């Protein structure tokens, strides 16, 4: 009996030693597993650098859509995601400084809202993955080698406006138009690329084209006044400079009952007449989705640029009435009628 008692005692001591060896400091197996889960969760804390070219409702919606797209794919701000957001307000020097700051602060991925912001980020880093959100000409802007195989640390969403459809809608609404005035910023790569595509569509429609450019927002009011005396309609390609001062464009064009055909969907509620526009929120959602895929391990170098196509036919009926334009009934039946913002036209 004594021998059995001694054996039991030795077995108990041995078991205690084993537990102490594998689970030091009094940890149980369950405690150790819990700590490993906590460490894994902590390791998945992600920082996203988000740089926006300027303040404008369309770019704001792209930003909001991007955050939504990240959340839809498992990266939720305040839970496992921290966003370092900077807005350069159209100042290129400030944009470059902010891009460098975002990179030096540390980020797992950076996202540029607009072409200038995306370019500033590519100048700041060749290592951190970059997602360009809604860029009109990623190859021409020097952001990627090709849309099929980007080749570096940059990929993202291309915002390709359906310019042919927009011009066709314009001529259906305004069949008497002969001369189209096109206004854009001479300093934006994306605006020049979209203007070139629009020029082809306008000339193919048999219309005369007059091109007007501005270098900054201070020139817009006088330029729109000049255009309104020389053309029948104003077409506005995607352009951050024009977008940031669109209220000025509208107020000056309204003095002459001048129809505005913008590219961006939100500009119809702000005073444009009609367009076929891509949802800015959806552009952002697609950008956030691509960012999530890169965070999950996809390589930007061989992740093809996503091209956003199509869009809804949008009409501001109140604006049409205010400037004396009659919209054909068959067009109205196939359009989304947009209410002006704040009761304005």
Image (tube, rainbow, N blue to C red):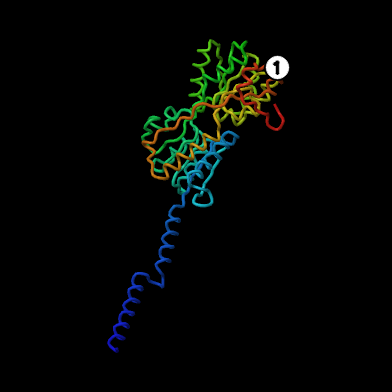
As drawn, the residue found furthest toward the left would be: 3
As drawn, the residue found furthest toward the bottom would be: 2
* Apparent side of residue 29 relative to residue 315 in the rendered image (left or right): left
The quarter of the rendered structure image containing the C terminus is top right
309 up-or-down from 11: above or below: above
Residue 326 vs residue 117, the one in the foreground? 326
- Within 10 Å of disc 1 (Cα), the crowding (few <14, some 14-19, many 20+) is few
Residue at position x 49%, y 51% from top? 80
* Apparent side of residue 55 relative to residue 34 in the rendered image (left or right): right
**Mark 1 falls on what kind of element?**
loop
Residue at position x 65%, y 14% from top? 229
* Apparent side of residue 273 relative to residue 208 in the rendered image (left or right): right
**Figure disc tally:** 1
Quadrant position of residue 37: bottom left
Residue at position x 64%, y 16% from top? 328
Residue at position x 48%, y 41% from top? 99
> Percent position (x, y) of residue 188?
51, 28
> Percent position (x, y) of residue 263?
56, 25
82 up-or-down from 51: above or below: below
* Apparent side of residue 134 relative to residue 225 in the rendered image (left or right): left
Residue indicated by mark 1: 324
> Percent position (x, y) of residue 173?
62, 16
> Percent position (x, y) of residue 219?
61, 25
The quarter of the rendered structure image containing the N terminus is bottom left
């Amino acid at each position: 009996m004594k021998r059995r008692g001694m054996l039991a005692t030795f077995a108990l001591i041995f078991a205690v030693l084993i537990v102490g060896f594998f689970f030091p400091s009094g940890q149980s197996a369950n405690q150790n597993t819990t700590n490993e889960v906590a460490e894994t969760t902590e390791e998945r804390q992600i920082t996203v650098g988000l740089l926006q070219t300027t303040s404008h409702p369309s770019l704001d919606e792209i930003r909001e859509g991007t955050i939504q797209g990240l959340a839809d794919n498992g990266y939720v701000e305040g839970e496992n995601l921290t966003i370092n957001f900077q807005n350069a307000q159209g100042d290129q020097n400030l944009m470059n400084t902010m891009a460098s700051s975002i990179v030096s602060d540390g980020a797992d991925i950076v996202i540029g809202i607009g072409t200038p912001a995306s370019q500033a980020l590519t100048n700041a880093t060749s290592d951190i993955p970059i997602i360009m959100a809604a860029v009109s000409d990623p190859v021409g802007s020097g952001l990627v080698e090709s849309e099929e195989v980007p080749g570096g640390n940059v990929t993202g969403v291309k915002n390709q406006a359906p310019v042919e459809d927009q011009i066709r809608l314009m001529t259906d609404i305004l069949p008497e138009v002969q001369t189209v005035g096109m206004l854009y910023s001479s300093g934006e790569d994306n605006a020049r690329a979209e203007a070139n595509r629009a020029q082809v569509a306008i000339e193919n429609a048999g219309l005369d084209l007059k091109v007007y450019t501005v270098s900054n927002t201070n020139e817009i009011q006088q330029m729109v006044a000049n255009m309104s005396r020389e053309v029948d309609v104003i077409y506005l390609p995607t352009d951050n400079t024009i977008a940031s001062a669109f209220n000025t464009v509208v107020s000056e064009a309204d003095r002459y009952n001048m129809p505005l055909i913008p590219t961006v969907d939100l500009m119809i509620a702000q005073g444009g007449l009609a367009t076929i526009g891509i949802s800015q929120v959806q552009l952002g959602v697609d950008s956030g989705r691509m960012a999530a895929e890169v965070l999950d391990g996809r390589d930007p170098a061989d992740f093809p640029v996503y091209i956003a196509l199509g869009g809804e036919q949008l009409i501001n009926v109140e604006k049409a009435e205010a400037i004396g334009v009659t919209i054909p009934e068959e067009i109205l039946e196939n359009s989304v009628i947009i209410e002006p913002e704040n009761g304005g036209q």
